[in-house]
Amino acid sequence: MKRPRQKRRGGLGRDAEKLIWLATGLAESGSRAEDRYWDRHLCDTIDRILEEGDEETLNAALDHLYSAEPRGYDELADFIESRAESAPGVSPEHDILLIAAPVLAWSRYRIPANSIPSAVLANLRVHLQAHVLANKVKLALADFLFSPDQLPQGYSATAAFVAELGRAAIGGRDLHIDTEGMPETAQFLSDTRYLLAAIAVPKGEALFAWQEADRTREQSLTQWRMQGGACLAPLMPGCAMEVVLPEAYFAASRQADKDGRPYAIRASVAFLGAELETPAASVRAVIAPFHDRELEEYRVGLTLRGKDQVVHGVVWPLLGAEDENVDGPAEIEAVLRDCGVTDIVNLEHRFPLEYCDDCGAPLYPSPDGEIVHAEMPDEHGEQPPRHLH
């Protein structure tokens, strides 16, 4: 996914320099005919680097372009993502694409990341093919509901994963995920889970339902929320949940990140209402910007009205090209008011991006203009996770 890059020290290798040259050429191209030249050579170079597993070269080229040539950075990032999620070497007769169906969830208990029973997989297959995918699509589902920590790490790992899943799609079977040695899932009050699948179609055919006549993304999302959500609910006991439209892997992940920000605020207000029997009208929110070298995120400290103790907190990270010019506090305030929170304080002081030395949790702004640890009231007893993902 496209994220701000940190400039690296040292020289660039030959392949990184070639990627930079090709991406810059594409960014400066003045015609579709010229585009096709750059496209072909970019695809060939990226495919080779992904097959070699040379993640460092991809990141080095992205790092350089991020600061030196933003348009070239966007072009290269788009091409790397599209090649990593499409397994171009698996079948000359098929277009293959890795898709993700994100699930936003919050719970006072542990949010599951588990294997998916075959009966549930069969139901999910039916509703994906009926409401989300085009008619000629072959589908392979991974039989596991992934947490963010368990997704393929890096472009090369993603490419290897989709190649395996793509072969399963062509063969008409689902993919069993071996959970031995799978990373532990960090526990948050609110988090995302991912249903992953590969789709395969004859070259040039439609991939999604909305590419066909008289069908739209909005219709697909409405049907998936009703039918797919009902299939996924038994996998998420004790959780409130909301599904995101299944889409190409990186696009769906970005949309989940975006949708997860207001969802986390709504979850936090609902959590305080259930856990402390506190209506939204009795909650006060303190919004403040947090910087490293530049603005990184907003944090929201939640207190009970009339009290200064921060009892909970939410992180609202900046995504993609967002910076100080995006009115984050206004977006956050609109979500809070929609939840019923009307006592809102906006702090303009530049706070440092600090975390608790003991547990690593973010520190949140208090009404006094300090950054503090979120702590539930002493009388609350055993505490669930103190912050939202």
Image: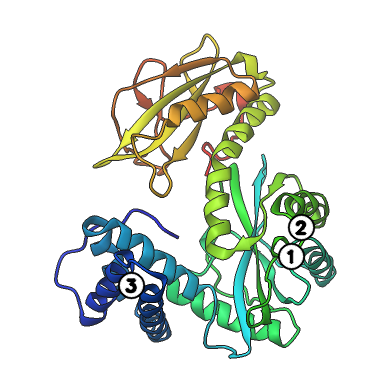
Which quarter of the rendering shows the N terminus?
bottom left
Q: Return the residue at label 2.
A: 215
Residue at the image point whose x is 44% and y is 76% from the top? 156
Residue 3 image point, x, y percent: 38, 55
> What amino acid is labelled 3 in the image?
Leu
Tell me the quarter of the picture where residue 197 sits: bottom right
**Taking 218 as reference, is 373 above or below it?**
above
Label whose residue precedes the other's in the sequence (3 or 1) = 3
Q: Residues within 10 Å of mark 2 (few under 14, many from 20)?
A: some
> What amino acid is labelled 2 in the image?
Arg
> What amino acid is labelled 1 in the image?
Glu
Residue 136 image point, x, y percent: 76, 77
Q: Return the residue at label 1.
A: 212
Q: State how far apart marks 3 and 1 are (Cα).
A: 35 Å
**Taking 100 as reference, is 265 above or below it?**
above
Q: State how far apart marks 2 and 3 are (Cα).
A: 37 Å
Mark 3 secondary-structure assignment: helix
- In this picture, residue 352 sits left or right of residue 169: left
Tell me the quarter of the picture where residue 370 sits: top left
* Residue 112 visible somewhere in the drawing: yes
Q: Return the residue at label 3.
A: 58
**Whether label 2 touches label 3, CB < 8 Å:** no
Residue at the image point whose x is 51% and y is 29% from the top? 332
**Taking 115 as reference, is 384 above or below it?**
above
Instruction: From the viewer's side, name the closer residue of 87 and 288.
Output: 87
**Whether label 1 touches label 2, CB < 8 Å:** yes
Mark 2 secondary-structure assignment: loop
Q: Nearer the viewer's eye, disc 2 or disc 3?
A: 2
Residue 291 image point, x, y percent: 30, 37
Label whose residue precedes the other's in the sequence (2 or 3) = 3
